[in-house]
């Protein structure tokens, strides 16, 4: 088929396109959050002393970290799904969460005696954390990869990694309500590992399913 | 020029999204020109038909037109899609080339089918006996005929032929060994 024939065929098809991309992303996040909440309440549930914990800075910080991560990754993922959009600034914004975490770790190192550092870092729930953050984040990640598949990421692997961060942020937010290891040292170690798993999965998934 | 293209294309695409087929046709026509220009400039080694890139890009624009935000500039969007399709096509071609080379290597396993660069030839020549070396050099590097070489070196033509043949055999033998070492 020559190009002018192709143009004629395409031009004849001006049906309404699908939902605009920003709406698609917001819809995806709402569904992902409900999905994560469903999985969380079905298999984990909040920790029994959550009311008392909510009065401590360490417990609250976990949500601050997860929210910063998810929010910044959301903006970046949305930009990465649109050809020609400037995603570099949004990518810089993602550094907010690790920066916050680094500051919290430094504060914690001052607050605890060096003898207590290792115990705080290892905690009691390392493996639980490594299991449930990815488990809760898996559904959201699948939803985001589907959005990437429907949109047009020109850097599929990067977009998939950022989708993994977004899913990781949501998974970490939910899991944080269950876990009673609140030290930033624990968060920096185990949450990071768990989220890195989702990032790797997102990159691999997107390079396979988000090509167009 | 660029700015006029930008405004005009954005206007046409907005009209297209609200259902104007004529405007969409015009948009695609203009987009095709821009992409054709880009593809012709980027495809320097041949092997890919620029028109294939144009068509793939037009199709992608059509299928992914919901990813353009109406308040965003349209040229960066359009060129990003074209570049993606171009890179995709280079990658696929690279893969195809690898396959083709793999098949050729299996069919003609002989090292003689390789073309050698000057440095490698020089390297191989130094390993030859002096008599063979001057003969091979004279014929392969300087481009003299067998008769000319015989006259130049004061040898019989038969002797030149034999020395040339032995020299080449020695060189190909060495390259064969080298390749085996690399495996």
Image (cartoon, rainbow, N blue to C red):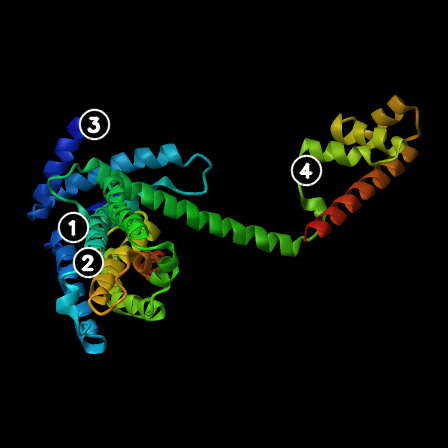
- The residue to which callout 1 is attached is B66
Q: How many marks?
A: 4
Figure quadrant of residue A204: bottom left
Q: Which mark sits nearer the N-terminus, 4 or 1? A: 1
Viewer can see residue B123 = yes
- The residue to which callout 4 is attached is B116
Host chain of mark 3: B
Instruction: Name the secondary structure under disc 4.
Output: loop
Host chain of mark 2: A
Host chain of mark 4: B
Instruction: Indicate which disc residue A63 carries.
Output: 2
Residues under numbered marks 3 and 4 in contact, where contact means CB atoms less than 8 Å apart: no
- The Cα atoms of the two marked residues, 1 and 2, are separated by 34 Å
Residue at image position (71%, 49%) is: B179
Q: Nearer the viewer, mark 2 or mark 3?
A: 2
Residue at image position (36%, 57%) is: A117
């Amino acid at each position: 088929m020559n190009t002018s024939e192709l143009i004629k065929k395409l031009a004849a098809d001006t049906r309404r396109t699908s939902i605009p991309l920003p709406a698609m992303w917001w819809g995806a996040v709402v569904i992902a959050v409900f999905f994560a909440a469903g999985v969380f309440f079905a298999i984990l549930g909040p920790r029994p002393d959550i009311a008392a914990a909510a009065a401590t800075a360490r417990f609250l910080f976990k949500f601050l970290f997860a929210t910063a991560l998810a929010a910044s990754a959301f903006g970046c993922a949305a930009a990465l799904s649109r050809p020609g959009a400037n995603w570099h600034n949004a990518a810089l914004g993602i550094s907010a969460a690790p920066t916050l975490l680094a500051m919290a770790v430094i504060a914690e190192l001052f607050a605890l005696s060096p003898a207590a550092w290792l115990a705080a870092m290892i905690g009691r729930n390392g493996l639980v954390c490594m299991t449930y953050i990815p488990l809760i984040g898996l559904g959201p990640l699948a939803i985001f990869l589907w959005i990437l598949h429907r949109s047009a990421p020109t850097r599929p692997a990067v977009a998939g990694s950022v989708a993994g961060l977004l899913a990781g942020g949501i998974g970490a937010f939910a899991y944080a309500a269950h876990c009673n290891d609140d030290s930033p040292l624990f968060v920096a170690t185990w949450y990071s590992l768990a989220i890195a798993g989702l990032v790797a999965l997102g990159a691999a998934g997107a390079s396979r399913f988000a090509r167009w | 020029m660029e700015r006029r293209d930008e405004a005009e294309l954005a206007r046409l695409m907005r009209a297209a999204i609200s259902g104007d087929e004529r405007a969409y046709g015009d948009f695609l026509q203009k987009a095709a020109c821009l992409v054709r220009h880009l593809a012709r400039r980027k495809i320097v080694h041949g092997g890919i038909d620029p028109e294939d890139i144009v068509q793939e890009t037009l199709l992608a624009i059509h299928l992914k037109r919901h990813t353009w935000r109406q308040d965003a500039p349209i040229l960066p969007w359009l060129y990003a899609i074209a570049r993606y399709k171009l890179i995709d096509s280079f990658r696929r071609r690279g893969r195809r080339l690898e396959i083709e080379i793999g098949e050729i290597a299996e069919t003609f396993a002989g090292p003689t089918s390789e073309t050698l660069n000057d440095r490698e030839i020089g390297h191989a020549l130094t390993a030859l006996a002096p008599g063979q070396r001057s003969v091979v050099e004279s014929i392969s590097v300087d481009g003299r005929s067998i008769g000319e070489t015989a006259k130049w070196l004061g040898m019989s033509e038969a002797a030149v032929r034999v020395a040339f043949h032995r020299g080449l055999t020695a060189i190909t033998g060495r390259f064969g060994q080298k390749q085996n070492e690399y495996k």
